[in-house]
Amino acid sequence: MTRLGGPLSSPAFVRAVPAFVLLAAGLLVPAAPAEAQPTRPIYPVYEGYVTNDDDTAVLVFGYYNHNSVAVEIPAGDENGFDPGPADRGQPTVFEPGRQRNVCLIVLPVDYEGNLSWSVTVAGNTGRTTERGGLDTLYLIENISMAHHLARRVDTATAEHGVCVEPQPATTGSER
């Protein structure tokens, strides 16, 4: 019978090999991805407004989340409207990408103020235009989806000054 000799067969080497293999295997296994932290801005967008026959206007807002993950920001100082109240029922979870027509606000057609929405994430503040009122530059044409959504708001029963959810679109077969 042949006996192996030398440093590779020493008891210390034989004990060290399994530990080295386990250590090397741990280095080769990919680490679980760290949860993505929102570091990029979210820009609220004033889409414009639609006037109605009952002397109301519906302001339409959306946003653009530049993060690859949904970001939750409670209504308040970092997610609010000016002039207040800051909490007007706006979204508090911002899905990634461009989201249109997520907040429709009913106001009297003679409203003369500017309603601005600001969102702060990771120290970056995005704000809608200071002209977020009934400036004719922002009158939504009747060919857009925003116009059709705003026209579906029941302005007689909708609470004024807060976000209302748009009604789902109807198809020709539902008429």
Image (cartoon, rainbow, N blue to C red):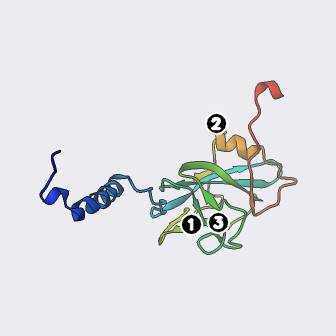
Q: CA distance from mark 1 to mark 3?
A: 14 Å
Seen at 81% across and 47% down, the residue is: 53
- Outermost residue, front side: 1
Q: Which residue is mark 2?
A: 143
Locate residue 162: give its quadrant: bottom right
Q: CA distance from mark 2 to mark 1?
A: 29 Å
Q: Which residue is mark 3?
A: 115
Q: Nearer the viewer, residue 7 or 122?
A: 7
Residue 156 drawn at (x, y percent):
87, 53
Q: Nearer the viewer, residue 55 or 154?
A: 154
Q: Which quadrant: the C terminus?
A: top right
Residue 23 drawn at (x, y percent):
32, 60
Seen at 70% across and 69% down, the residue is: 87
Q: Secondary structure at mark 1?
A: strand
Please tell me how crowded label 1 is: few (under 14), some (14-19), or many (20+) other residues with Cα within 10 Å: many
Q: Nearer the viewer, residue 133 or 5?
A: 5
Q: CA distance from mark 2 to mark 3?
A: 24 Å
Seen at 77% across and 44% down, the residue is: 167
* Callout in the foreground (1, 3): 1
Q: Which residue is mark 1?
A: 119
Residue 105 drawn at (x, y percent):
72, 57
Q: Secondary structure at mark 3?
A: loop
Q: Secondary structure at mark 2?
A: loop
